Amino acid sequence: MAIKPEKPSPTAPAKLTGLKTTEPKKVAAGIPAVISSAKHVLGEMGLGRGLKALANLNQKGGIDCPGCAWPDPDDERSSIAEYCENGAKAIAEEATTKKLDANFFKENSVSQLSMLSDYEIGKKGRLAQPMFLPEGSNFYQEITWERVFNKIAEHLNSLNSPDEAIFYTSGRTSNEAAFLYQLFVREYGTNNMPDCSNMCHESSGVALTDTLGIGKGSVKLEDFYNTEVILILGQNPGTNHPRMLSALKKAKENGATIISINPIIETGLLNFNNPQEIKGALGIKTKLTDIYLQVKINGDMALLQALVKLMLVEEDKRPGTVFDISFIEEKTQGFEDYLTHIRTLDINKLVAESGIPLETLETVARILSTKNKIIACWAMGLTQHKNSVNTIKEIVNLLLLKGSIGKPGAGTCPVRGHSNVQGDRTMGIYEKPPKSFLDSLEKVFQFNPPRKHGFDTVESIKAMHSGKARIFFAMGGNFLSATPDTLYTAEALQKCDLTVQVSTKLNRSHLIHGREAIILPCLGRTDKDVINGELQFVSVENSMGVVHSSKGSLKPISDQLLSEPDIVCHLAMATLKNSKVDWGKYLLHYDHIRESIQKCIPGFENYNQRVRQPSGFYLPNGARDNSYNTTTGKANFSISNSDAVILQSDELLMMTIRSHDQFNTTIYGLNDRYRGIFNERRIILMNPKDMEEHQLNERDLVNLHNYHDNKERVAPKFIVLPYDIPQQCCATYFPEANVLVPLNSTADQSNTPTSKSVVIKINKHVS
């Protein structure tokens, strides 16, 4: 009798690995960062391959880091290392010499691999050839590229409607691949194009589009060197965007005041040792933050409104000395209504909701009252709450009051987390494409793109779960681990007829699959991409709207890898009969792709010429130029109310965070060096007073529960650690705690999962 294979696990197993702790660090980077980088590079790539990759990383004409989207300097780049510790880890992870071929999959079943942790899965190596998992099988088997494209095409063409297919995109995808991908999907007939932006900065895009007319930040890197005040809200640059520390250091040297707003004291916001400078190598630190506001989770809107209310008091005393009235009158709409609203707010209520003492807020308000060049930076600490869009609009309100938009040293800076997530949106990766973009596609390619809005990420999960969508195709990423409500999402994927993953490395999304599953191994940023003897390059857009090239320099680990543009073109040719697009032309040279992009998307004129400039080129940005493409034609003030999450006495508000040894869902190691947590990820950081009230001791083992919509979600076996975090607030690592994030708890307007505002209860784990 055949033994039924064990059901694959949709989450990392709750096996504990031996926690060690130290006091949190007080200084970021320095020599420990150099040592950590070297260990990862040598361990995965070897000396020669590693040095070759790092020498080209973020250099002009070199490899764009596959990690975060922080911009490179326009002019001089460091000849020593134009990258950070986590950039080196990202390169080591991608360019590893370990490879997974058909023999690996013959020896390792899907159910066996799923019992590994996400860290263990990722460390297996690079995917080396296309693989196919037949219905009912527990083992992937090799398949030719030709057969795999025909099989996907057969599935797609058997659907009752193109809207039964979901096409997801990761932020790693290049401009060229993203443009071709959306072109194929729209000629196929759907706008079901969810992407990782739906889960991270969608709230920023919605808020900034409504208020300033463009869903991107307005600052350039050079503005950091000329500003007076930098507000950093809900962001941990030392771990998630480490090269930003160099910009903050330069800002401090030029006299800027840095105000950090975060529920946790993050090392990368305190002090910085630049290991490329003698002082840094000697351990002589640069202090970054001047004032640290340890706000309650989701207390940011209350904090911002309290600051504005206090500034208004000073403006009333000395009219025209605090607010930039001439800018407000000329460039904005809704000022008087906004002030009327602020006057009605209770300062004591705002102070209580923010968790910051009134005296501290008064100090910050005095600083802001006397400065006119202010930059506001934020990341997912602001974007993943129910009121995220309105909170970001409140940032815009403050900047508009000060005239801190459209001038040197001032503006908005949403710091994107993945290297081309902003560029993908520019290329048309969006479930709600604007009419003007679809009109351009129709004019250039002579087909009728679908006009009905498609599914975003949350809607896609629900569609798969209900049977409305039957095929899931992912261009990069680790969809299962990145999304909320892990068990529900796993069920959704398993209900599909086919799941397809375009990937460089093995991840859990390959192991929780539809009735049939396919893995398409692709070239990475570091890999040479040669067509007809000519080395190709792709392009990306960074957080500040600079489009520049990225060219791989390493020999691919397998001759069975295809580039993402190649994969899209071959899939389109197999799927679309009588296509209006000359897909074969794009296979000959990537210049042909860029020629089509410039015909469809404003700002890409002479694309092939300008992208070959050493530093690339800036895209148009109305807010940067004080031109606002809004419904009013001006920058809009917004009126919002601070709605705090009401907790019962036995509840905590949980936020998910990243460790210093990870980037998004990619786990580089098990250490969170800056927070002093080693060899373990299943931890919950709690205020010591909350531990006492819950009768918990340090290192107690607990289960975490969420009951949103009267459905119990459980994350078992987390280790309690006391930490400096506001009362009734706690923190856990992403993605281990994603199982607790309710799918139906999303931000108003943006539909982003509220991964930073999860109401939980705790009980002790019983073995």
Image (cartoon, rainbow, N blue to C red):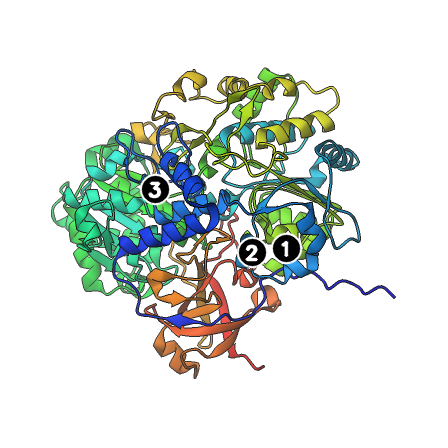
Question: Does 114 sit left or right of 270 as displayed?
Answer: right
Crowd rating for badge 3 (residues with CA inside 10 Å; few <14, some 14–19, many 20+): many
| Separation of marks 3 and 2 at Cα, in angstroms | 31 Å
Label located before the other in sequence (1 or 2): 2
Q: Decide: marks 3, 2 in contact (CB < 8 A)?
A: no
Q: Which badge, 3 or 1, comes first in the chain's sequence?
A: 3
Residue 244 makes an appearance in the image:
yes
User: Where residue 83 is drawn, which disc sits there?
Assistant: 3
Residue type, mark 1 in image: Thr
Is residue 311 something that shows in the picture? no
Tell me if label 3 and label 1 are in contact, CB under 8 Å. Answer: no
Q: CA separation, marks 1 and 2?
A: 7 Å
Mark 2 residue crowding within 10 angstroms, few (<14) / some (14–19) / many (20+): many
User: Which residue lies under the disc numbered 1?
Assistant: 489
Residue 76 vertical placement versus 252 (above, below): above
Q: Residue at x 56, y 22 (%)?
A: 531
Say which quarter of the image contains residue 654: bottom left
Q: Position of residue 575 (x, y in %)?
A: 73, 29
Indicate the position of residue 161 as horizontal and vertical percent values: 75, 36
Amino acid type, callout 3: Tyr
| Front residue of 320 and 55 | 55
Q: On the rendered image, what quadrant is the C terminus found in?
A: bottom right
- Residue found 61% across the figure and 34% down from its top: 559
* Residue 724 % position (x, y): 32, 69
